[in-house]
Image (cartoon, rainbow, N blue to C red):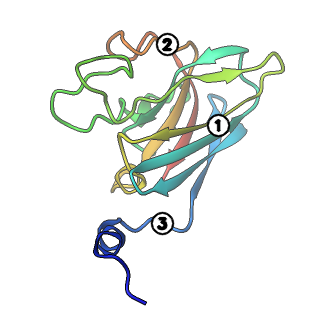
């Protein structure tokens, strides 16, 4: 059986997707496990799943950060947001481009648990697993998706190292 030329070309041009997702433990500032994050490579980005407990109810900023280092209790060891180069600025609603670390907010219910699944076309799993890895951080307040540099999301309250 012969495939139509356009279909055959599309199959050859489609990048390979990693079969195995990457799972990382989510920790609070005391170093206690409070959940997990799972990242799965997709043909045009990365799929992120977050499952957390023990957080304050309400909306929380969620970002990819530069380093797989959650060693400091305030998580500043994870560096800033992944950027992606060029003139990118923070904010999913910012017309001046998006950083690769920009993600939608996470909602946490009255019982302190939150879960979400979000897709980012701004980065890839391979980019997040570079030489120094990256981190998924949850912030104390919601991200307004426009303010610089972190959308008013406040302190870092949970961290998962992605290697």
Q: Which mark is residue 154?
A: 2
Mark 3 crowd level (few <14, some 14–19, many ≥20, 10 Å Cα): few
Residue 35 vs residue 8: left or right? right
Residue at the left extreme of this rendering? 86
Residue 18 in the image: above or below residue 35: below
Question: What numbered label is drawn on residue 18?
Answer: 3
- Earlier residue among tags 2 and 1: 1
The percent coordinates of residue 44 (x first, y second) are 38, 51
Spot the residue most to the right: 111
Q: Are marks 2 and 1 in contact (CB under 8 Å)?
A: no
Give me the residue at 57% from left, 59% from top.
21
Residue 101 image position (x, y, % from top left): 39, 33
Q: Which structural element holds mark 3?
A: loop
Which comes before the other along the chain, label 1 or label 3?
Answer: 3
Q: Are marks 1 and 3 in contact (CB under 8 Å)?
A: no
Rendered image: mark on residue 27 = 1
In what quadrant of the picture does the N terminus appear? bottom left
Res 85 quadrant in image: top left
- Which mark is nearer the camera, 2 or 3? 3
131 lies above or below 54: below
Q: Residue at x 71, y 16 (%)?
A: 56
> Height in image: 19 above or below 87?
below
Q: Is residue 79 left or right of residue 50?
A: left
Mark 2 vs 3, N-terminal side: 3
Between the residue at mark 2 and the residue at mark 1, the CA separation in whole angstroms equals 17 Å
Q: Secondary structure at mark 1?
A: strand
Q: Nearer the viewer, mark 1 or mark 3?
A: 3
């Amino acid at each position: 059986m012969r495939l139509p030329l356009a279909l055959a070309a599309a199959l050859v041009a489609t990048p390979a997707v990693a079969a195995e997702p990457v799972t990382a433990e989510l920790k609070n500032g005391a170093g206690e496990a409070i959940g997990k994050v799972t990242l799965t490579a997709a043909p045009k980005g990365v799929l992120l799943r977050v499952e957390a407990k023990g957080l304050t109810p309400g909306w929380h900023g969620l970002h990819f950060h530069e380093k797989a280092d959650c060693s400091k209790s305030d998580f500043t060891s994870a560096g800033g947001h992944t950027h992606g180069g060029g003139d990118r600025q923070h904010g999913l609603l910012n017309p001046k481009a998006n950083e690769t670390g920009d993600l939608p907010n996470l909602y946490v219910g009255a019982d302190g648990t939150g879960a979400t699944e979000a897709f980012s076309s701004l980065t890839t799993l391979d980019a997040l697993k570079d030489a120094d890895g990256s981190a998924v951080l949850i912030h104390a307040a919601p991200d307004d998706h426009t303010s610089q540099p972190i959308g008013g999301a406040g302190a870092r309250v949970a961290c998962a190292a992605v290697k």
